[in-house]
Image (cartoon, coloured by chain):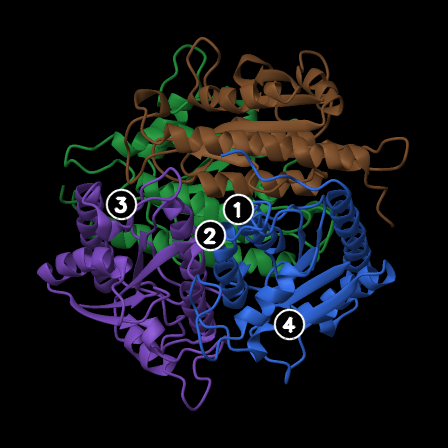
Chain colours: A blue, B brown, C green, D purple
């Protein structure tokens, strides 16, 4: 089984990413269950704005898109900015929007029989909303959302430390991340054994 | 297979409900697939505010709760008010909140291996947000969300006709509702054949 | 100047309310600025579902509505349930929905030239979203939202103590609440001195 | 009085923008009230991800930032993608996030005494949510939100025509846009006459 992790930190890999640190807990748990994981750091790539799969020369998205189609699991990892998913998380949802009308040989939207989860960090508040926003897009695109298929870390009220500044609350976030990994694999396996057909028109 | 439909219209059954009319399309499609459906009109019942399963004498929720546990599928049907799920839709999510800590004999949250969908009506705008808000709660409680497991009808911009006042857009909403029914049954069947285990702690 | 505070705790006044405890900080700061404050505990009242101002016998809302029209400031205080405003907060927004089409002698929606703020408590995460949801409704109804006119307290990640269980973070929430009170009074005074006219049709 | 309009279409000005077409109605109404308007098409500019005001060489944001500080009014115009503000709308909110800690000579956050509005287009559903999301960020940053300071156009249910493909519903969207302009100017004028002080710490 394969998983694609999209790290939507605003910072490129020259800077440490709290979202990556927490995603790594989920990745480790997925790997222990035999899932091969590939991570893309969107800020390192050229992913221009648009809603088509291929925007032409210099667009790195087609590479990610190809990998998504080879993966049973997608995980979106994002920081929280002004209480929302990052602009890069919204960017990848916009690029994935084209998948709504892409279908496989059986006439199914290509995201059918794939599952998705969300990892959120922030230094204040907002993770559940970020998760709901991202899942809202993913369900429309055709992904299945397993139960409790998310983890997060923040530490309100008000501004405070970042995830990597403290160990407070890490145990809960890690344990929740391991449960998330189990549920992603569990629902993906159920759909692999008994896949959805194309929906009636 | 069983489905429970929770109609969260603000009006009791003495008045017609647009949400019910659209939910009926989904119910008919579920029944054609052999699902036995039970509908509760929340405004007709006594469902006091709280986050426990049983609030004592005069509380009708335990009856709904029992039915939810006997159902593989739950559908929340709601109008849109000030752009949000109705207060009765939020009420049922609050009452379902207790299910997070209720577990079955295998130690799984009781909503695991059950699926959920949403039906929304309104006379303006807001359905996708209503769906995301409701799904956000349901994923936390332990439900699995199948792909495109919703339908809606509204007709913006601005105030305008209600669902029952016009036939415009009905075809799309009905066809989307039939796809929703297929996906609810498909994912529920996959989880029945290969159920999730209790998540690791 | 007058303020109406709507406490939307799910519990009646026989139980302590964390939302009230934090709202009290805002109320004290409003009173120090000469604002007369009236608080309604919605769970103690009969506020049936609907979108009209007066639902007839046994409806306590007309009393609140009258008080809102005599107030330059409204504050909605709510707990966070499944990441959302409480069902009673949504209930009061639904009842206030009728105010969109109520106009004063000058043809202005009755909420024009009034300001609003939000107080949120919870034991996990979600305050900024709760604030955005409530403000979304209030702006539609015709209220003006002053800058940073909110305060909140929660303590993620995951389940944890309630506001009254700990002193952690209280200083920030109280200081933010005092700034909120100053901004509510400041914008209300500006609108009193130079009120909005009826919008062009 | 000055207004800055941020057009957050995913497309650069080589393509027509529905959001611009509707924003133009608001701009015309502002100009009739004597407001000088400057529009930035974000997709034409280099606005890299981050939460600082100046990200160094090649960053066009400092120019926008300077203009925002010279404007009493800001309008964010955005399309709706997967039910959310566009990634470029989220981008500008992230860049404006730095304004929370920028203060003027009187110790006030620089956005105080400025007002904001939102223009949304889409071909389906989601405008009220987009407005609430954007306003949520703007209130945190320090803007005041006048009543009904938004307009939108979409045409659900389901996929359908774009704003420029049809005249349906334009009257309502335009009239709402003119009311928005009046309320932006009215509240900006009230705050100019009687500005907010720095909040107490």
- The Cα atoms of the two marked residues, 1 and 3, are separated by 40 Å
Q: Residue at x 46, y 24 (%)?
A: B22
Check whether the beta carbons of the residues at disc 3 and disc 2 lie within 8 A of each other. Answer: no
Label 3 sits on a secondary structure element that is loop
Q: Is residue C17 left or right of residue D129?
A: right
- The Cα atoms of the two marked residues, 4 and 1, are separated by 22 Å
Most foreground residue, C13 or C93: C93
Q: Residues within 10 Å of mark 4 (few under 14, many from 20)?
A: some
- The Cα atoms of the two marked residues, 3 and 2, are separated by 35 Å
Check whether the beta carbons of the residues at disc 2 and disc 1 lie within 8 A of each other. Answer: yes
Q: Residue at x 31, y 45 (%)?
A: D154
User: Is residue A56 at all visible to an observer of this figure?
Assistant: yes
Do marks 1 and 3 share a subunit?
no
Q: Would you name the residue on which mark 3 appears?
A: C113
Q: Residues within 10 Å of mark 1 (few under 14, many from 20)?
A: many
Q: Would you name the residue on which mark 4 appears?
A: A40
User: Looking at the rendering, which quadrant does residue A167 occupy?
Assistant: bottom right
Q: Residue at x 88, y 37 (%)?
A: B107
Q: Which mark is residue A140?
A: 1
Check whether the beta carbons of the residues at disc 1 and disc 3 lie within 8 A of each other. Answer: no
The percent position of residue B17, horizontal first and vertical second, equals 44, 18
- The Cα atoms of the two marked residues, 2 and 1, are separated by 8 Å
> Of marks 4 and 1, which one's residue comes earlier in the chain?
4
User: Looking at the rendering, which quadrant does residue C69 occupy?
Assistant: top left
Q: Which mark is residue D82?
A: 2
């Amino acid at each position: 089984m394969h998983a694609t992790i999209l790290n939507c930190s605003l910072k490129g890999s020259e800077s440490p990413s709290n979202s990556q640190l927490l995603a790594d807990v989920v990745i480790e748990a997925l790997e222990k269950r035999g899932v091969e994981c590939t991570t893309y750091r969107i800020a390192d790539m050229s992913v221009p704005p648009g809603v088509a799969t291929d925007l032409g020369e210099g667009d790195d998205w087609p590479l990610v898109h190809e990998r998504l189609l080879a993966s049973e699991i997608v995980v979106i990892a994002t920081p929280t900015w002004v209480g929302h998913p990052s602009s890069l998380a919204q960017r990848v949802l916009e690029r994935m929007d084209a998948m709504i009308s892409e279908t496989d040989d059986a006439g199914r939207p290509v995201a059918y029989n794939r599952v998705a989860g969300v990892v959120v960090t922030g230094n204040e508040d907002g993770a559940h909303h970020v998760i709901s926003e991202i899942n809202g897009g993913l369900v429309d695109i055709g992904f299945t959302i397993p139960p409790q298929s998310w983890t997060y870390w923040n530490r309100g009220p008000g501004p405070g430390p970042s995830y990597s500044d403290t160990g407070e609350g890490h145990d809960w976030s890690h344990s929740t991340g391991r449960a998330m990994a189990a549920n992603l694999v569990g629902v993906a396996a159920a759909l692999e054994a008994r896949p959805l057909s194309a929906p009636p028109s």
